[in-house]
Image: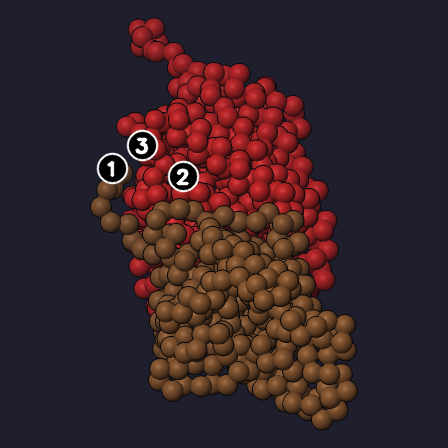
Amino acid sequence: MKRKVKDLINNMNLAKVRFWIQLVSFILFVYGGYFAVDLGSKLPIFACPYNAQSGGACYLMPLQHQLAMPAKILLGGAGIAVLFGVLTFLFWFIFLNKAWCGYVCPFGTFQDWLTALRKSLGIRYSTYTQQQFEKLSKIKYIFLAIVLMVPLLIGVGVLGGEWSSAFCQICPARIISPMFSGDFSQWAIDFSTKTAMVLTAIGMIFAGLFLAGSFVKKRFFCFFCPMSALHFIFARSSIVKLRKEGSKCTRCGDCYSVCDMQIKDIADDVTSTDILRDDCILCLKCVAACPEDDALHFDILNLKAFSSTRQGFEKRMGIEKPKGDRDE
Amino acid sequence: MSNRLNREIETPAEKQNRHKAMEAITVLNTLKESFKEPPKAMGYFYDLFEEVYCHQKALHSDKVKVGTMCIQIPSEIIYALDGVPIRLCNGFYTDDEIGSDLLPQKSCPLVKASVGHLASKNITDRPDMIYSPTTCDQKTKAGSTIEGFGYDVVDVDFPRTKESEISREFFRRSIRGFSADLSAKTGKKLSRKKLRASISKIGYAQSLYHQLSELRKSSAVPILGNDMFLVTNAFFFDRIDSWIEATEALVEELEQRAKEKVHAAGRVSPRIVYTGSPPIFPNYKIPLIIEESDAIIVADETCSSNRMFNDRVAVDEWFVNDMIDSLADKYLKACTCPVFTKNDDRIRRIIELVKSHNADGVIYQAFAGCTVYELEQRSVLEAMEKEGISILYIESDYSPSQHGQLSTRVEAFVESLKIKNRKRR
């Protein structure tokens, strides 16, 4: 019985299962308001609070607000609120880890849909060279620094109040997310102050880049996402893990060629057992594309929940007995 | 007297064919008669080799025949362009002798035999063009020698470092170039549908091999290693659909044998992982000695057999370029050929095979003159020693001599494994 359930999971059509989970999550987080769903504002995903109907909100906005408090208050009692916020964020994160990106984040899902649109038009995706990838992959830490440092600088009085939630001003999710519930009001440049004008103009540019970029490049924005950087800092605390058994790996590169995030280590590193890298979105496409039994597996509490298997691989790649047109 | 006058004098080609037929039939008869009853489904393969090598039967007269000098040329692309891949690696001593006149004496017998075969122009399925991946020095240089015999030889750039991203990109471009060239020569367009279908077809052939490999892991091994070499070697030149059908029948029969616990060797026969220079029909000199010495080859790490079938192709978006890139990665990154700068992957693979197939020891055979395998034996021996795996290193060639000396060494090794097993028990 146990064996049968295991086979059923390992041989599943991951793409389909993922599509439905993503769709349900998208509805929940973009239209949750209509169903009176509110999962709080400490979520580790880009469910943007600018979208009035959001069923829960991104942690980066309250984090910026809290950090922007005057230094004295922040170091006093309010520090507890910040700590509480981090703990709530961690609480969510411990369960799904980066799978929030691959399965839940509406902004990630939207990118996958743009990819599906491109695919249906028969246009091939573009990739980065390894050097470009290594450089671009660092940008998310710059954004994370903006998320953390700007509010702190407001708190100590170096920057004025117009810098409030500076990252949200430049974040494409602020502009794009509300659109799903028919709100196009964020498609505007705020001329109230010079800073606001510059920040919102950058936001508009980023939104444009996001739409064009995600169309040609799989998970374009995830390379730059500061939430992903924040995730990685806490990655070790999670109960779920992406593991690799190097002795079973033939470095065939199958996992690498299906990886939306172009993570080279997934194929080439045969010594790390914990193979989660900072860009990973835990979509598990690599596990599904690996033809070696148990070389890659997704673990929950150190138990293999989804493993790579030869059979699962063959099923997903459509490998079957050839029909018709025999060569004789 | 009159009989003597009417006797026709054998032409050099006829003589060559007669000698080759003798080599081939000797091996086939040994396989059929010297061991326990072979699986009935092996009959297809025995007949196939006999027809092709004893009766010079051509199999692909109606198709574009694409000769390949090594396994790094994706057969998936050749089939998608309606061609037939024919791997030109040769195992005949007769051809080795012809090649000896054309190449340095110390060259690898496989290269000499391949060159000799093409030099003789006595080929049933003569390739219309040849793609030569620049793998080892001797194969690379052999390409230009073969060109001199009037063949259209195209070099396919192959990197010697596989860890770097530059190499990956390099080989992806190289395979794109190869498919464009073949497409131009055949006048066919590489379509998405056809390439996907041929990836699926080869994938299916691989899945059959994987099923056979699974069966060889059990305590009663239902098939001899030499029979397996014959099955995998047939993939070099056979009609793919016939091969699939015959292998399907073999899988079915072996599954039955496995259920009945039929062991192709003896109950205490040591289990061997075979590695090194590729055994190519009919040069099964060492594998035959091994199995005649009451050991059984349960797995191998050679390019003519397990390595050729092991690694699979996965594609995310089924566009032509995506498929080509994935194919290129498989043929480069997963390859454990000793031509590469480092050999960690090969060592890991051998250890994995020993563990997964519960093997008692490793036999590493290198052709005298096959520099890369000769160079690599030391590091492999060291790695095996560290793991506590018994290993025997042998140097050999295609000549029928040395049999006594070689069998003495192999028998002694097999005996030592038996003693070890007895002690353990």
Relative image position of residue B379 (x, y in whole percent):
72, 51
| Rendered position, B111 above or below A272 | above
Query: Which residue is located at x 29 percent, y 53 percent?
Result: A321
The answer to the question of whether label 3 and label 1 lie on touching residues, with beta carbons closer than 8 A, is: no
Q: Chain of mark 2?
A: B
Judge by depth and name the residue closer to the eye, A52 or B139: A52
Q: Nearer the viewer, mark 2 or mark 1?
A: 2
Chain B takes which shade in the image?
red
Give how far apart the Cα atoms at labels 3 and 1 are.
9 Å
- Give residue A222's mark: none
Helix or strand or loop: what does disc 3 sit on? loop
Is B271 rendered above or below residue A151? above
Q: CA distance from mark 2 to mark 1?
A: 19 Å
Q: Position of residue B144 (x, y in %)?
A: 57, 22
Task: Judge depth for marks 2 and 3 and give the one in front.
Answer: 2
Disc 2 designates what residue?
B77
The quadrant of the image that shows the C terminus of chain B is bottom right
State the residue in front, A313 or A60: A60
* Residue B346 appearing in the image: yes
Q: In the rendered picture, chain A carries what hue?
A: brown
Residue assigned mark 1 = A328
Can you tell which of label 3 and label 1 is closer to the viewer? 1
Disc 3 designates what residue? B59
